[in-house]
Structure formats: structure tokens, C-alpha cells
Image (cartoon, rainbow, N blue to C red):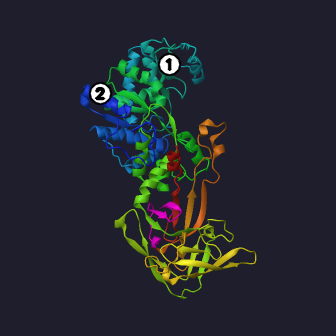
Amino acid sequence: MTEAPREADNRVPEERSLNFIEQIVEDDIAAGRNEGRVHTRFPPEPNGYLHIGHAKSICLNFGLADKYGGKTNLRFDDTNPVTEDTEYVESIKADVRWLGFDWENEFYASDYFGRLYEFAEKLILKGLAYVDDSSAEEIAAQKGTPTEPGQESPYRNRSVEENLDLFRRMRAGEFPDGAKVLRSKIDMASPNMHLRDPIMYRIKHAHHHRTGDAWCIYPMYDFAHGQSDSIEGITHSLCTLEFEVHRPLYGWYIEKLEIFPSRQIEFSRLNLTYTVMSKRKLLQLVNEGHVRGWDDPRMPTIAGLRRRGYTPASIRDFADRIGIARRDNLIDVGLLEFCIREELNKTTHRVMAVVDERPLKVVLTNYPEGQVESVSIENNPEDSASGNRQMPFSREVYIERDDFMENPPKKYFRLSPGGMVRLKAAYIIKCEEVVKDETGEITELRCSYIPESRSGSDTSGLKVQGTIHWVSVAHALEAEVRLYDRLLTVEDPSAEEGDFKDFINPKSLEVVRAYVEPSLQEVHPGERFQFMRKGYFCVDPDTSADRMVFNRTVTLKDTWAKEQKKG
């Protein structure tokens, strides 16, 4: 993997250089550390749906273990009962499996609540932890600033016996929420703010999705995370860069508890243009009704991408192309779109769909009334084994209104008065008459067809520069098409002033009617197609026996590849 996206037309070399994490792993194996084992983990908090940034981490953790013959655990960081839910647990498991991975073990931080409590008592007995009665505001003030040392809590020098008694009474539920916390006793003057007596436990009288009401004190992330890694024998604990400043604390707990020394390694998080990746902000979009749910196809969630028509292979390809870097950067969403285009171009059938609320009816005046013939359509020119299908052609067909212009400019190659085009896979037609209603709106085009110009057996000698798609009026099926676009109007909302919701794209969803060819009568949710000349579309789960719904995955236009070539 490389730190910068490869150009669109580059092929992945058979042998590529190691990324910095792979180099660390290979050095550890060569040095015989951990008996040469590689054991990673993916540790999501079940407080929301996974997004494309998590997909990068999933591909990294599972891919690394697979490359070096190791194992990967799925561990849910369920230490905050207020925000977590089994719905999120199940969605996370489904997303990981959908991406093509399976875990060696399924664990929960809550599995270790007993062990973590014992670890906390061990630190108290060593004089390295104390119960603090200070309020949250007082503790924040005690912390100081990055340039000024903190102030010790007045409760910092309680005796071991008093701390142990108070902590056990916290565990027994004697105190209300916020009355006391357990803090590590490290260094209030440390230049690293995370080492200034961090909180280890807080009181929360809240029902936990797995342990119920068995606990009313819960460990903080920094205390639970490293110890959970150690309990599981994780050799390489891969985190995003915001946890780099937490690493000294991670190591301090392992050293003082004298437990298995898991190794934390940080890599850049994924930031994608025209969207947000914060679960808190994504939850706002859901709760405030800006999107239809976590699986809305405009969302960067894995569920949303799946519903939009993205495939596991395209997301894995994207993760490979962006690589693993040591610094955060902003990745162009065009690269993600390029990856899905690359795959769907090779795998999807080409179908006719007139996506237009008011399609134009074309009447072929010299075509026999009542006659219906079949024309042959190649399912996928990229796949010779995909074969052909038959599509009905008749006297009246629909075309998109954009494929006709009454007063065309030069080099306009679609239909116009007196002009000629080919109907894809069928005949060349010529526009003879434009029919309008009393308001002047065009309602119908009367055209002639050239019988000798049938595709595959054209003897007309005519040459036309335009080819347009169509459907037979008598055989067309009506469908709903949801045209999705970028969620936000700015590339990087974090660089803008104001609320990120101020930049929600009002045109991120347009719902239109379409008329599709009859071969789509029996489609099923999740099936993908290329609508000729329009883009790639996926059948939405809202589809039923009497209603077809398609989501636009991505347009045919590939601006990212063009921009890369310019560069």
C-alpha cells in the first residue's frame, strides 16, 4: 500500500513495498517477539453504525492477520451503557461479514468487567489509584493547560485502605452518579495531559445491554482498552492517530499491572470529501431527519453504501488504494466512486431505462401498427460470456426529453427536426414532425424509420453520429428512481465556519419517475445494473411486487480519473 492514491489507470504491482505497519510486524516476527504471533483486533463501540472509515480499519486489521497467518478478534467496546445498544452490535457484525471478513473470537469489554475491577484494586493497593470526590468541573480545572502544570486533587493522598473501602462502596452502589470517580495517580505536571491523573472509573446507574444492572461503575476507555488487549494477547493494537497521545498511558497501565505487553501502533484516519465521519454528527443527521436513517444511501455508513449499490470488493479496493499513512489527509470521494465504477463496468448488465418524469413519445409513422419485433441487446460488452437478451420494439417508443432539441447548436448529435439518430440496438430514425399542445410544449415526435438500418444487419449505407436509448411504450414498466448526490456542498466541512449542517446539499436526493425495459420485471433488492448512458443503479429494499425502486450508485462520468490524468 502507498500513502497517496494511485492514478486511475495504474495497476497494482505484483510486489509492492511494505507499509510502515507491515514493516513493524515483519521486524517483530524476525526478532521473535510474541513467538512470531500476529493477533489483531477490531474494537468498535456499539453506539452507531460503522462507516467507511471503519471499513479501512477492518481491512487493515483482518488483512494484516491474514497476510501473516494470524488471528483477528472482534471486540465491542461496550463500557458506556447510556449510548450503546444491541441494534448496533448486530449491525456491526453484519457489516464486517458483508465486507468479507470473519473473526477468530467475539468478545466484549463487558466480558472483562470483573478482571478490570481486579486490576483497579491492584493499582489502589500499589498506591497508584485513588477515589476522588471532586466534581467534573473541579477535575477539569485541576488538569491545568498544555503550557501550565495541573494541581493535585485534595483527595489525592487518601490512604490505600480508605481508597479501597470507597471504591468497593462505589461498586456496591452506595453513591449517586457523579459523586466520586477513581483516578490513576501519575503526574499532574506531565506535559502529556492524558497522564495528569486520568479517570479510570465513573459511577453510572444505568442498565447495560449485556450485564443488565450488575454494575453501576464503568471503566473509562483508556483503562479498559489496553487491558482488554492484554487479556486477549493482542500483539499489534492498531489505532487511528488521535490515540497517539494516549499511548504513554496505554503503556503505563501495562507496566504497572505487569500484564501482557500489547503494542499500540497509530495510523491515519480516513477523512472523505463532501461528508462527515463523526458518529456524533451522523447521529445528528439521523435524529434530526436530514436523512432517512443510518442506511440512507447518502450516508458514509457501510449500511448506506451497501444500500446505494457499493460492493464489498469495491470498498476493499478503495481501502487498498488509499493505503496506510502516518498522517491524516483528505481523500477525494471520487476515488471511491472510481472503484465501484471499475467493478460494475465489468459485472453489470446494460439495460434500457428512460429516466424522465415527462418522456417524449416517438411515433414511427411508417412502422406497421400492431407489429412487435425483438431486438438483441448485449448484456455486458466487457463480459463475452454474459450473452444477449431480447427486447421488444414497436411503433411507439419513449425517449428522454434531453435527447431532443428543437433548435440545436452545432455538433449536437442527438435528435432534432429533420435530424437522424440510431435507436440503440434497433433502427435509424428521422424526425419528420414536432407535435405540441396548446401551451407550446412538445408532446410527441413523429418520425420515420429506415427498415434497412436494423442493427446487426444494416444495409442502408447511412451514417449517423448519435445513438440514444429508448423503451417501447407498450412494454415499458414504470419505476421510481432515486438520484443521489454528495451529502454536503463543501469538500471539507471541518475547514468551514459554522455548523456542518449548514452545508447539507439540498439536491442530494431527487426522486423521479422512469420507464424501464420489461426484462426488469422480476428484479430483487441488491441487484445492480447499468442504465445505458445514465449510470449504475441498484434495486432498493423498498421494491415490492407492484413497485420498483432503483438507487443511483454512481454516474458514468469519471471526473476523478480525468483529474488524476491531468495531474
Residue stretch rendered in magenta on the structure = 519-542
Is residue 122 covered in magenta? no
**Residue 523 painted magenta:** yes
Q: Secondary structure at mark 1?
A: loop
Tell me the element at label 2. helix
The residue carrying mark 1 is: 192
Q: Which residue is at the front of the view, 407 or 255?
A: 407
Can residue 92 be seen in the rendering of this structure? yes
Please determine whether, in this image, residue 530 is positioned above or below residue 243: below
Residue 23 vs 274, above or below: the answer is: above
Residue type indicated by callout 2 = Asp
Q: Which residue is mark 2?
A: 28
Q: Is residue 526 left or right of residue 22?
A: right
Kindly identify which numbered label has been placed on residue 326: none
Residue 334 on image: x %, y %: 52, 48
Q: Position of residue 248 (x, y in %)?
A: 43, 21
Please tell me which residue is depicted at 38% across the width and 16% down the height of the picture.
Answer: 125
Image coordinates of residue 486 in percent, x first then y, are: 58, 50
Q: Earlier in the sequence, mark 2 or mark 1?
A: 2
> Relative to 203, is 404 on the left or the right?
right
Q: Where the N terminus falls, by quadrant? A: top left
Residue that protrudes farthest toward the front in the picture: 461
